[in-house]
Amino acid sequence: MTKIITADNLDEAAQCIANGGTVVFPTETVYGLGADALNDEAVRSIFAAKGRPADNPLIVHIANREDVYKLTSKVSEDAEMLMDRFFPGPLTLIMAKAPCVGGVVTAGLDTVAIRMPSNPIAHELIEKSGCFIAAPSANLSGSPSPTVARHVIDDMDGRVDYIIDGGTSQVGLESTVVDVSGDIPEILRPGKITYEELREVVPGIVINKGILQETEKPKSPGMKYKHYSPKADVTVVMGSKDNIQKFIKSRITDKVGVLTYKGGTYDGAFVINAGNNMEEYANGLFYNLRLFDENGVDTVYAEFADEGGIGLAVKNRLFKSAGHKAVNADNINL
Ligand code: TXA
Ligand code: MG
């Protein structure tokens, strides 16, 4: 039985974590499915609840900066500077792990992913549990990450001990993942903290090639799996606004959904407006993908434009949800 609670009741959820149970909690990015990171059995129950492949490692969430030194064996100067600027917040750092970190949470790697969330409920839960909390996004493996408690309940009711309803996630996309275990910091997953912001702190930072294309051997194990997919079939549509609209209009049937960007009307389709800037697009993306499914849509056309900043993270998630199916409407004769 899953107990659904609010932040007023954190004590029992914290106790549950300390006892080896599973608790879904809000963070500023998306909801996380947490358990004691140093308890292998507890961590295994996260993989079981999500149906997550065992070779995809989890992020360890901490409440205090000092905890970084308990979980890692080497912290580079770049890592220190990134933490100074972005902890707590939506940034995950990959560092060499300390011996106390087991092989289940790291999926056998010699590195560990660490994040210090800024969401006060997440912070308090970690503090009160007295544990470091391993937590992936709280969706069934392959589905869009949940950004409201209702979507957590859809996926996780009956599979976890507690769900804490903390309202809507502020960011809407998962944290930026940066590998600082080698000589050159590398962005493995784009997120709210952008390449442009990271470059101000560590000018040599590079972007992993797998972010915008499918690669054979990704550095972040999670990148090789099907991700963020609603049941509907998604196609990304780019090009001039005029051509995008002509292309999509030529394909409307009663089961077509359209994710418009900066407005647009599509008679006969189920239309959701992604917003007027990439922050808004990011904030609603996962929520909107699930909304199409809830409304019986079987084909989604998503308008998109390359605008940098958090747009890189939007592009990464959107292209994955589409299985990299994209068209440039400027190149199509209608
Ligand atoms: O915002 C977030 O990061 C959310 C909230 C709950 O904190 N969590 C999240 O976790 O998105 P998850 O498991 O859905 O994604 C973690 C990503 C995966 O792609 C995983 O492969 C990668 O981080 N990762 C974890 N440990 C790693 C490691 N040691 N080396 C490389 N990649 C790692
Ligand atoms: Mg995830």
Image: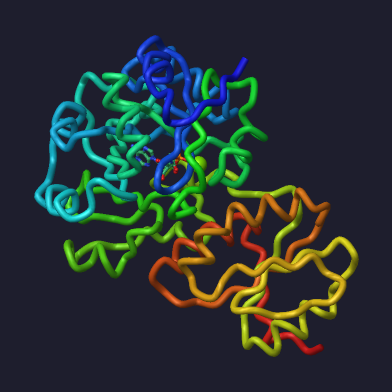
The image quarter in which residue 114 lies? top left
The image quarter in which residue 120 lies? top left
Q: Residue at x 22, y 44 (%)?
A: 181
119 shown above or below 318: above
Q: As drawn, which residue projects farthest toward the left?
A: 77
Front residue of 112/271: it is 271
Q: Position of residue 152 (x, y in %)?
A: 59, 36
Q: Position of residue 234 (x, y in %)?
A: 71, 60
State left or right for residue 27 relative to residue 164.
left
Q: Position of residue 10 (x, y in %)?
A: 40, 24
Q: Residue at x 54, y 76 (%)?
A: 276
Q: Residue at x 30, y 49 (%)?
A: 89
Front residue of 125/317: it is 125
State left or right for residue 64 relative to residue 223.
left
200 shown above or below 143: below
Q: Residue at x 85, y 72 (%)?
A: 252
